[in-house]
């Protein structure tokens, strides 16, 4: 049932609620302006950062190669054509196949030819000094030579490509072959991580699991100075290809950097937060100076501080600890002081009313209220700093970050990169659970 209002009542209602009946221009048109501005801003960013050209010119084919390198490894034999008509086989200097490789996917054929199998007899190449016969899905494609280089076969499928006298054949995940008129370079890919446990110089290299167990438990001593088990552990940690011992040491450095930097930052920020809190320290000058100190230390990114301290202390964990310490001191100080300023002052007044000294007032009137917040925030930043320590390590501040950057710079040890990334994920997962457990024990479980 509608109720009619008199003109006087309508005027009184408009006067009592002007924001409803006479909204400002922003309330009237704000949503429409935002809806129109959003696509305009997106178009501006797209043009300013030249995203279209970047996407068009991006080398997207490398993404698949890098991802394959994360989960596989390559052997790269090279077949050189000698002047006497023979073929000389060369392997990498530190070949993952060992010092005298004789893999089952390489076979010498009659007439001085060499055969390389890519995942099955239907996909293979036969190398001779006169031509290279390529078999794809059982179909033969002869690659001949002339003085300019290798010649692309007629009606060659998309797996073939030619550039500057080099014919490349792509066998998919199994690998590829680059054919020239002087040599053939084979890249043979295998799933897994090569020589992960023992390198090619280890006495345990090439052993399967049952043989390894027998050698460690009941075999004759390979080194009279130590047991076979101790030798196996040493060989694993000193693996020249994977460097497990050094990786574990750098990972431990990262954990220590995060813990020590966070601990020192919390220890310094805790008393300074009481100085910055206006309801505890009544001197405005001290409040202002302390808060500006917090602003300065936390406004400069941890990565920048790491670069500064690396210049001052040299590369190593001390620079990483200092970067975390300085950055988190400002962050903790701001969070702690805001928590103190938002306490219920009745508890503090109650402690003060019984004649307690100033220190006791803060001890029993403030700290019980803010301690759960302090613990929760500190534990969270401890988790985050384990990840942050990895980043600052990449600029020379020590830890596994520097090791990770070194592996990435080679542009071929992507399986090592995957290994260290998985270790970092595992450590973050473990310490996340440790942090949650400590938080639940100290301040109760989270809802």
Image: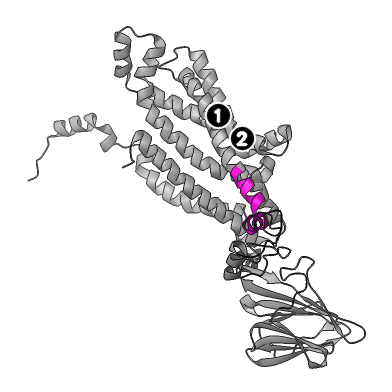
**Relative to 154, 400 lies left or right:** left
- Category of crowding for the residue at label 2, using alpha-carbon neighbours closer than 10 angstroms: few (below 14), some (14–19), many (at least 20): many
Q: Which quadrant of the figure has residue 350?
A: top left
409 or 99: which is nearer to us? 99
Q: Tell me the element at label 2.
A: helix
**Which residue occupies 65% across, 56% down?**
227
10 or 235: which is nearer to us? 235
Q: Quadrant of the C terminus?
A: top left
Q: Position of residue 191 (x, y in %)?
A: 60, 71
Q: Position of residue 158 (x, y in %)?
A: 66, 83
**Relative to 67, 85 lies left or right:** right
How far is mark 2 from mark 1, CA to CA?
9 Å
Q: Kindly identify which residue carries mark 1.
A: 264
Q: Is residue 154 visible?
A: no
Give the residue at the far left of this rendering.
1
- Category of crowding for the residue at label 1, using alpha-carbon neighbours closer than 10 angstroms: few (below 14), some (14–19), many (at least 20): some
**Predominant SS of the magenta segment:** helix
Q: Position of residue 353 (x, y in %)?
A: 29, 9
283 or 229: which is nearer to us? 229
Q: Is residue 320 visible?
A: yes
Give the residue at the far top of this rendering.
355
Highlighted magenta segment, given as a residue range: 224-252
Q: Is residue 218 above or below residue 77?
A: above
Q: Kindly identify which residue carries mark 2.
A: 321
**Relative to 118, 283 lies left or right:** left
Task: Point out the tag, 2 or 1, that comes first from the N-terminus.
Answer: 1
Q: Are marks 2 and 1 in contact (CB under 8 Å)?
A: yes
């Amino acid at each position: 049932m509608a109720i009619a209002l008199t003109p006087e009542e309508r005027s009184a209602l408009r006067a009592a609620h002007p924001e409803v009946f006479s909204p400002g221009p922003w309330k009237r048109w704000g949503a429409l302006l935002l809806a129109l501005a959003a696509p305009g801003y997106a178009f501006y960013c797209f043009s300013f950062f030249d995203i279209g050209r970047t996407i068009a010119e991006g080398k997207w084919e490398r993404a698949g190669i890098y991802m394959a390198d994360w989960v596989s490894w390559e052997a790269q034999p090279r077949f050189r054509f000698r002047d006497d008509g023979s073929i000389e086989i060369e392997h990498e200097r530190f070949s993952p196949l060992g010092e005298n490789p004789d893999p089952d996917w390489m076979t010498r054929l009659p007439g001085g030819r060499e055969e390389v199998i890519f995942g099955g007899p239907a996909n293979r190449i036969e190398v001779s000094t006169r031509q290279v016969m390529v078999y794809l899905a059982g179909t033969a494609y002869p690659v001949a030579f002339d003085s300019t280089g290798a010649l692309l076969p007629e009606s060659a499928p998309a797996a073939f490509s030619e550039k500057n006298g080099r014919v490349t054949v792509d066998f998919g995940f199994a690998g590829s072959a680059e054919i020239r008129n002087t040599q053939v370079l084979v890249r043979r890919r295998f799933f897994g991580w090569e020589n992960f446990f023992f390198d090619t110089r280890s006495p345990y290299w090439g052993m399967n699991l049952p043989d390894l167990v027998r050698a460690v438990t009941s075999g004759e001593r390979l080194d009279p100075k130590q047991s076979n088990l101790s030798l196996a552990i040493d060989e694993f940690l000193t693996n020249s290809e994977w460097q497990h011992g050094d990786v574990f040491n750098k990972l431990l450095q990262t954990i220590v950097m995060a813990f020590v930097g966070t601990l020192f930052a919390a220890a310094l920020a805790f008393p300074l937060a009481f100085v910055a809190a206006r309801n505890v320290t009544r001197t405005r000058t001290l409040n202002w100076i302390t808060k500006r100190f917090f602003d300065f230390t936390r406004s400069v990114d941890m990565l920048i501080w790491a670069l500064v301290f690396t210049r001052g202390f040299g590369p190593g964990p001390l620079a990483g600890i200092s970067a975390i310490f300085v950055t988190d001191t400002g962050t903790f100080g701001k969070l702690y002081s805001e928590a103190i300023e938002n306490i219920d002052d009745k508890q503090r007044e109650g402690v003060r009313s019984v004649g307690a000294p100033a220190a006791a007032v803060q001890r029993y009137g403030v700290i019980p209220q803010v301690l759960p917040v302090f613990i929760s925030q500190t534990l969270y930043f401890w988790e985050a700093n384990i990840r942050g320590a990895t980043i600052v390590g990449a600029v020379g501040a020590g830890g596994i970050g520097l090791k990770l950057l070194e592996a990435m710079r080679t542009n071929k040890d992507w399986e090592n990169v995957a290994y260290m990334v998985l270790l970092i994920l595992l450590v973050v997962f473990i310490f996340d659970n440790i942090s949650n457990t400590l938080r639940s024990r100290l301040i109760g479980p989270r809802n």
